[in-house]
Image (cartoon, rainbow, N blue to C red):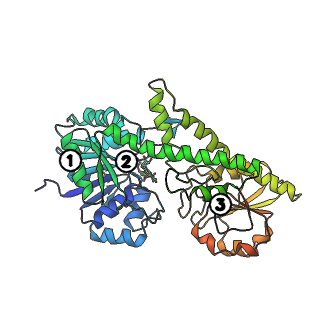
């Protein structure tokens, strides 16, 4: 019989933490969610979800089932397992672990003996042992491995992915010792179909960085090839489709306007931060960053070419951007390449408008004026009032637009199959 009244406490209720509390509650666990953003907590408590993968209906259902959400952390001390899912951004291009440290001190102030503490935030190898544990031990005066259990389990959630979800995506788990590893594995087996145990927390931390750096590097590679193919007058999309027919040894990646979100543009920096401590840069990461970061400028240069060939000046032209989120069917605009594209177009005197069914407003440089969030009805009736349309994010909703009827040049930065009459990246 556990001495705790709750199975799980989660610190940080964002893209990672909210699905975790909802799915765990649905799996029959008693769950407590804590977030220090009070307005967000108020809205979650009313059943308003801020992420697409959790509907208001399913959030409300879990609240009715007993999910507790709060902006006060005290009840954490009654939770057998505590998961940390707070942001790990870059500040001045360096890993910023201040949120992880703040979560660690919150735990230390509310800790109970025998609790199982699991870090899920993405970070560099060594964080659990070098940063998380010392922070908890110094405040609580308890000892990891003796008084409480600790481990690391990277979150692999892919927001908006309808095939691979919270439950069927295998979960990597680890512990600082055998007892911690075993407790953590048993816990995740209650909520996730397949749990994969690795030998230590550093290995688990590194798994996440391998996965995301792999994507980052391969996206950069295909982006570079797309630019080169355009210069060689070769259709990169046809080449990719043909290469995909090889049944082994080839995984396809697609070119695009750049990388966005809280993971791919950021996580590889955590890897290079760690390797620089031993005097070695990760050369692939640096090259990939350089290439992916130039993609928004490349898109603008292609738009400029199109406008030139139409004998239209960029200055005072009207350009509509369809989709500003960093990927399809979600509202996340963190690090979205659309932001750099908008700023660049604006600096060339373009009147920029956008329509994105998921994004009502977008934060850009204050001096940049944009016709924000043009309404759908207005957009679909007035396509022809623009000089050019940039198709930036291939939201499913856009597949219902009849692009054939639009008599405006379109530049497609996504290679979607909705568009047959466009210039492609
Ligand atoms: N978004 C993704 O798709 C994704 C996927 C895998 C891993 N990750 C990683 O998971 C972590 C969380 O990412 P996210 O996208 O969920 O972030 P998010 O910004 O959506 O959510 C984080 C939440 O933590 C809260 N918070 C911050 N500091 C806190 C504190 N001290 N105490 C309590 N709450 C606090 C914030 O208010 C916010 O609601 C990051 O390390 C990220 O790299 C994210």
Label 1, on which residue?
A: 182
> Does residue 405 sit above or below 180 in this rendering?
below
Can you tell which mark lies on residue 415? Answer: 3
* Residue count near mark 2 (Cα–Cα under 10 Å), binned few <14, some 14–19, many ≥20: many
Residue at 48%, 46% in the rendered image: 212
Q: Is residue 116 visible?
A: yes
> Does residue 84 sit above or below 193 in this rendering?
above
User: Camera-side residue: 278 or 95?
Assistant: 278
User: Is the C-beta separation of discs 3 and 2 under 8 Å?
Assistant: no
Q: Is residue 346 visible?
A: no
Residue at 49%, 43% in the rendered image: 213
Label 2, on which residue?
A: 154
Image quadrant of residue 421? bottom right
User: Camera-side residue: 237 or 335?
Assistant: 237
User: Is 309 situated left or right of 200 in this image?
Assistant: right
Mark 1 vs 3, N-terminal side: 1
Residue at 63%, 51% in the rendered image: 337
User: Is 3 situated left or right of 87 in this image?
Assistant: left
Mark 3 vs 2, N-terminal side: 2
Depth-wise, is mark 3 or mark 2 nearer the camera? 3
Depth-wise, is mark 1 or mark 3 nearer the camera? 3
């Amino acid at each position: 019989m556990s001495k705790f009244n709750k199975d799980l406490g989660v610190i940080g209720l964002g893209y990672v933490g909210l699905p975790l509390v909802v799915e765990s509650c649905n799996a029959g666990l008693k769950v407590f969610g804590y977030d220090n953003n009070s307005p967000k907590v108020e809205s979650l408590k009313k059943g308003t979800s801020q992420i697409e993968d959790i509907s208001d209906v399913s959030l409300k259902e879990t609240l009715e089932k007993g999910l507790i959400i709060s902006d006060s952390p005290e009840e954490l001390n009654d939770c057998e397992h505590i998961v940390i899912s707070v942001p790990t951004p870059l500040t001045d291009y360096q890993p910023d672990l201040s949120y992880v440290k703040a979560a660690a001190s919150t735990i230390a102030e509310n800790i109970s003996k025998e609790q199982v503490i699991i870090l899920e935030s993405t970070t560099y190898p060594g964080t659990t042992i070098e940063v998380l544990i010392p922070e908890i031990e110094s405040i609580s005066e308890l000892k990891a491995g003796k008084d409480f259990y600790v481990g690391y389990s990277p979150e692999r959630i892919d927001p908006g992915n309808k095939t691979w979800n919270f439950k069927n995506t295998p979960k990597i788990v680890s512990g600082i010792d055998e007892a911690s590893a075993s407790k953590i594995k048993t816990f995740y087996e209650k909520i996730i179909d397949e749990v994969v145990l690795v030998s230590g927390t550093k290995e688990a931390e590194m798994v996440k960085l391998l996965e995301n750096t792999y994507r980052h590097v391969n996206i950069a590679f295909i982006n570079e090839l797309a630019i080169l193919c355009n210069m060689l007058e070769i259709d990169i999309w046809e080449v990719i489709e043909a290469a995909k027919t090889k049944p082994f040894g080839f995984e396809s990646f697609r070119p695009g306007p750049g990388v966005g979100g809280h993971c791919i543009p950021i996580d590889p920096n955590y890897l290079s931060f760690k390797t620089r401590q031993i005097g070695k840069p990760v050369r692939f990461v640096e090259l990939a960053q350089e290439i992916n970061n130039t993609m928004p400028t490349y898109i603008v240069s292609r738009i400029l070419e199109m406008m030139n060939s139409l004998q239209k000046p960029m200055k005072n032209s009207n350009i509509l951007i369809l989709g500003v989120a960093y990927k399809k069917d979600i509202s996340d605009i963190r690090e979205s390449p659309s932001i750099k594209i908008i700023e660049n177009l604006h600096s060339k005197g373009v009147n920029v408008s956008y329509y994105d069914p998921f994004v009502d407003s977008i934060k850009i440089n204050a001096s940049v004026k944009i016709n924000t969030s043009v309404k759908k009805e207005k957009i679909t009736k007035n396509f022809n009032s623009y000089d050019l349309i940039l198709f930036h994010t291939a939201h499913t909703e856009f597949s219902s637009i009849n692009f054939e009827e639009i008599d405006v040049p379109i530049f497609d930065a996504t290679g979607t199959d909705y568009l047959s009459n466009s210039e492609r990246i």
